[in-house]
Image (tube, helix red, strand yellow):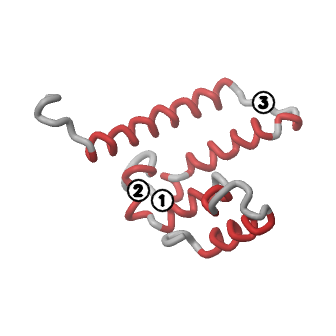
Amino acid sequence: MQGIPSKIRMKTSDKYEEDSGKRGGKEFYFDLIDYRDIISSQWNLFQKLFGYGRGNASKEKRTAWINFVNDIRKIVAHSSSGRSVSLEQLAELEMYEKWLDNQIKQVDDNENPPSDDES
């Protein structure tokens, strides 16, 4: 729980206790939107990986994509509300997915550079 803002730790612990830990560790009780707060609170650590857009924009703007993804998640998770995801929203979601995949691939490539045999 190191590096996790206290309000998230407390909320997660409460959910864990209410559920008697049936999902597993406390990390299984985070909400998607909690990750935005974690990223923002540890911005120096996460900005290169999770900061979308121009580097000089605020962390709020560079993490706004997480709010968008969370809003789409709510539409899908609560389909009985009668709302649906538009084609434009789907296209934006796919754009974020492609960007995030590329971000993660860059980290993987930097951590596991090809050996001389693979070059």
- Quarter of the image containing the N terminus? bottom right
- Say which amino acid is labelled 1: Lys
Q: Secondary structure at mark 1?
A: helix
- Residue 110 in the image, given as x and y percentages of width and height: 26, 45
Residue 103, placed above or below residue 63: above
Label 1: few (<14), some (14–19) or many (≥20) C-alpha neighbours in 10 Å: some
Q: Is residue 3 left or right of residue 76?
A: left
Residue 84 - label: 3
Q: Residue at x 45, y 50 (%)?
A: 50
Q: Of residues 23 and 91, which is closer to you in this image?
A: 23
**Residue highlighted by disc 2:** 47
Q: CA distance from mark 2 to mark 3?
A: 31 Å
Q: CA distance from mark 3 to mark 1?
A: 29 Å
Label 2: few (<14), some (14–19) or many (≥20) C-alpha neighbours in 10 Å: some
Whether the residues at callouts 1 and 2 have beta carbons within 8 Å, the answer is yes
Label 3: few (<14), some (14–19) or many (≥20) C-alpha neighbours in 10 Å: few
Quadrant in the picture for residue 36: bottom right
Residue 59 - label: 1
